[in-house]
Image: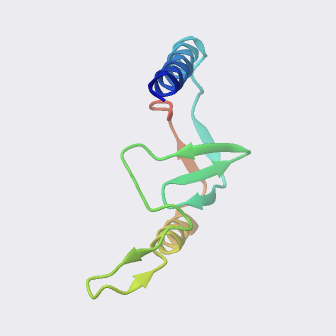
Amino acid sequence: MLAIANTQFVVERADAVQSTITNWTEQLPGPMRGRASVIDGDTVEIAGQRIRFNGIDAPEDRQYCDDAKGFEYPCGRRAAAALDTFLAASRPLHCTFVDRDR
């Protein structure tokens, strides 16, 4: 059982190292501008390219949260709807590359 855990760890770490090397060697994308489609509360898509906002973490689209009274609500859908409302007033979106997301 321990050997399996070690092997999985080594394989996962090798993938992470390869991903890091690829990120260092790939050319960085230039700025993007266009009409953004909302994927979830912190991710949009412009011309087939997914863009995640730097410094923002929002619930995933299908995620539910509990309010102060303990009632469950669709916080992920609400976050996506709030972003879509914001973007509707500020289109087209202009994005500048900051960093790659794992």
Q: Residue furthest left?
A: 68
Q: Nearer the viewer, residue 36 or 38?
A: 38
Relative image position of residue 22 (x, y in whole percent): 58, 16
The residue nearer to you, when weighing 99 against 75, is 75
- The image position of residue 89, as x and y in percent, is 53, 68
In the rendered image, the vertical position of residue 75 relative to residue 5, given as above or below: below
User: Residue 52 versus residue 11: which sits nearer the camera?
Assistant: 11
Q: Look at 53% across and 16% down and name the residue there.
A: 14
Occupied quadrant, residue 47: top right
Name the residue located 40 percent from the left edge and 74 percent from the top edge: 65
Q: Residue 86, how many percent across, how many down? A: 49, 67
User: Which residue lies at the image location 35% right of the left edge and 78% below the top edge?
Assistant: 66
In the image, farthest residue toward the right: 48
Q: Is residue 66 left or right of residue 59?
A: left
Q: Position of residue 21 (x, y in %)?
A: 53, 13
In the rendered view, does 69 fall on the left or right side of 9?
A: left
How many labels were placed on the picture? 0
Question: 2 or 66: nearer the eye?
Answer: 2
Query: Residue 68 falls in which quadrant of the image?
Result: bottom left
